[in-house]
Amino acid sequence: MSTDVDEVPEGAPGGRGRTSAAGSALEKSLRVLEAVAAPGGPHRLTDVATAAAVPKSSTFRILASLVEQGFVRQEAESRYGVGARLRGLAALVGGGEPPSIGRILGELRENTGQTVHLALHSGETITYIRKLESDQPFRTASRVGMRMPLHTTAIGKSILAHLPADEVRDLIAATGLPRRTPRTLTNARALHAQLAEVRARGYALDDEENEPTIRCIGAAILGPSGRPVGGVSITTVTFLVSREEIEAYAPALRAATEALTPLL
């Protein structure tokens, strides 16, 4: 009988309570997750299966579930990397991510006086993993762990702008462009035109497209392969900061994303 399904009685010598010689379903999933998170990623399916000591077919099923849940992201050529939910979980362990990330975001907040977000890309959404509130007498509805659409947010649009055009078309076909406010872009041609502008100037704007009265500027953080892994945004309210004023923060924003690149 295959060792992938042979049961080992709980408490048997050498068994340690495991349900099979290759480990329980949970143990296999954790080993696959560890293999994905190993340095040098994103990793090929075959390499993940070998490192995790899990059959390739089982590894594929586990990865599909982890991708769906946002713990792993699937890249081109059947490669797998760390997803936003896993990064977000890591940020919560031991009081957060490395201090240098917090310092960079803190300096951006201090220099602009506005709320700062850090989000990571996961499939069809972004996930906020850090939020530094401003001292302004208002609060936005965003929170750490919240998942948001790509087409309505400044971070999301900056990410879309750095994805291949066919991948953006596939995302739009899969999710549509649901309206969140009267200013949300719901026309694919108009969105593609705006993404071209984002690439040219290096940042994106959310001008009340995700939430009424909220205005944001965002820029992508690119990984070693040039694919966006996440982004940073500066958020304010329309009645305090004009579009021209928030666009003046672009150099500081781009400097922050460049400083964060080697840390994510």
Image: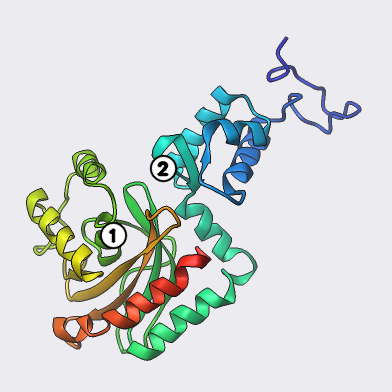
Kind of residue sitting beneath label 1: Gly
Q: Is residue 8 visible?
A: yes
Q: How is the image coloured?
A: rainbow
N-terminal label among 2 and 1: 2
Q: Residue at x 51, y 29 (%)?
A: 60
* Tag shown at residue 75: 2
Q: Residue furthest right?
A: 13
Kind of residue sitting beneath label 2: Glu
Q: Residue at x 43, y 61 (%)?
A: 145
Q: Quadrant of residue 84?
A: bottom left
Find numbered disc 1 in the image and state the secondary structure of the residue it sits on: helix
Residue 203 left/right relative to 41: left
Find numbered disc 2 in the image and state the secondary structure of the residue it sits on: strand
Q: Residue 112 location, x and y as percent?
A: 33, 88
Q: Residue 244 location, x and y as percent?
A: 15, 84
Give the mark count: 2
User: Which circle, 2 or 1, is nearer the viewer?
Assistant: 2
Q: Quadrant of the N terminus?
A: top right
Q: Residue 27 location, x and y as percent?
A: 68, 36
Q: Residue 212 location, x and y as percent?
A: 17, 71
Front residue of this view, candidates 144 and 252: 252
Q: Residue at x 62, y 64 (%)?
A: 93
Q: Quadrant of residue 176?
A: top left
- According to the picture, the residue beneath numbered tag 1 turns out to be 156
Q: Residues within 10 Å of mark 1 (few under 14, many from 20)?
A: many
Q: Is residue 135 visible?
A: no
Residue 213 left/right relative to 76: left
Marks 2 and 1, Cα distance to the nearest angstrom?
17 Å
Q: Is residue 181 depicted above or below 43 in this figure?
A: below
Q: Quadrant of residue 174?
A: top left
Q: Residue at x 53, y 33 (%)?
A: 45
